[in-house]
Image (cartoon, rainbow, N blue to C red):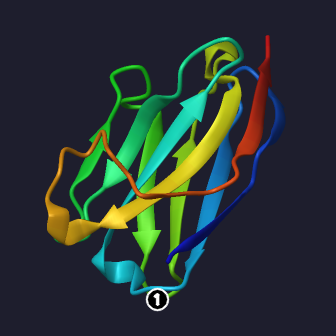
Amino acid sequence: QVQLVESGGGLVQAGDSLRLSCAASGRTFSSYDMGWFRQAPGKEREFVAATRWIGRSTYYANSVKGRFTISRDNARDTVYLQMNSLEPEDTAVYYCAARNGALALAMTGPYNYWGQGTQVTVSS
């Protein structure tokens, strides 16, 4: 079992930056693929970014490529999402997700474990 706790959300203005953190516990963090997803009001949850457990390859949705950066610190069992040049369209609840990296699945999903989410609101 893996427990995930997100933090770092908040209310910012367009053009600002935020860094989300996701602290993991319960299993060997370094062997897990980690991802970030978001869900805006009235919309389905969508993939944002992910990092593979081996080689630390990163993947991004087209809508955030060049603005967001996912990274992980295996010594701290934490994955980050640095979000720059935020836009009102980025407003959503952001969720951290994890899965066993040995499954070698597509980085957009599925994931087994989910955090409770952190709200990001970007005003224009």
Q: Name the foreground residue: 90 vs 109.
A: 109
Q: Which residue is mark 1?
A: 75
Left or right: 18 in relation to 3: right
- Residue at image location 35% in from the left, 28% down from the top: 61
For the C terminus, give its image quadrant. Answer: top right
66 over 6 or under it: above or below: above
Q: Position of residue 3 (x, y in %)?
A: 59, 72
Where residue 54 sits, quadrant-wise, is: bottom left
Where residue 15 sits, quadrant-wise, is: top right
Left or right: 58 in relation to 28: left
Where residue 85 sits, quadrant-wise, is: top right
- Residue at image location 41% in from the left, 20% down from the top: 63
Q: Position of residue 118 (x, y in %)?
A: 74, 46
Q: Secondary structure at mark 1?
A: loop
Amino acid, disc 1: Ala
Q: Is residue 55 visible?
A: no
